[in-house]
Amino acid sequence: MFTGIIEATGSVTKLQQIQSDWRLTINAEKLDLSDVALGDSIAVNGCCLTVVELTAREFSADVSNETMNCTTLAALKAGVRVNLEKAMLASSRFGGHIVSGHVDGVGSLLSSTADGKSIKLVFEVPAGLAKYIAAKGSICIDGTSLTVNEVQGVGFTLNVIPHTQIKTIIGDYAVGQRVNLEVDLVARYLERLIQGDSASTATGAAIDRGFLAEHGFN
């Protein structure tokens, strides 16, 4: 479990294919690794990965083909900066929102404009994820917990303050940037609960106006 509060940025040392899978090695000298052990979880650009090799300044993680196909990790090259967050402790301050490190899809940056000292970013998301994104709700972008300002169709906007621009890789983004997205976990479970018994069918019931009316939502 993570909070979406980035602890440090690192850089890719190498991404190599080992037989049918992949191994990602990260230079994490800015991240305190003194309390990290083999088997621990570290989120890399929002993807929860398991540490399989560890030195004083680097760690390596195995990445499955499924993860490579569903995230932006396949595009990483040596030297590229990444966001890093260690799994939270039960005693940690919960500064962001509930983040699982399980990427729901990949979005893209449509525009970036100055808004005072902040930057206003507009992202496009896969159509199937748009329903989970709400104005003033939470969204996780490359592992960073952010607040949605506006939503319109498959697009949403947010503002990023200078501190976040400096402490994460968001300051590196250019129009067209592809990013890992994790929607609010509560929205996912709420949809499933509303489906009720129909959730156990092969396809589940579509939540539309007819479905809501049938179940007492007016």
Image (cartoon, grey):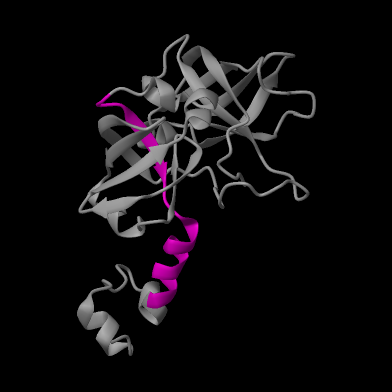
Residue 178 is a magenta residue: yes
Q: Position of residue 58 (x, y in %)?
A: 65, 15
Q: Determine whether 27 is above or below 122 in the image.
A: above
Residue at figure coordinates x 26%, y 81% from the top left: 211
Q: Is residue 31 left or right of residue 193?
A: right
**50 within the magenta span:** no
How many numbered badges does the structure rendering display? 0
Q: Residue furthest front?
A: 116
Q: Which residue occupies the foreground of this view, 102 or 9?
A: 9
Q: Is residue 118 visible?
A: yes
Q: Residue at x 28, y 87 (%)?
A: 218
Instruction: Name the residue at 61% across, 20% down.
Output: 60
Q: Position of residue 40 (x, y in %)?
A: 69, 34
Q: Position of residue 109 (x, y in %)?
A: 28, 33
Q: Quadrant of residue 36?
A: top right
In the rendered structure, the answer to whether residue 97 lies left or right of residue 69 reads right
Q: Is residue 18 in sight in this rendering?
A: no
Point out the stretch of residues depicted in magenta. Answer: 175-194
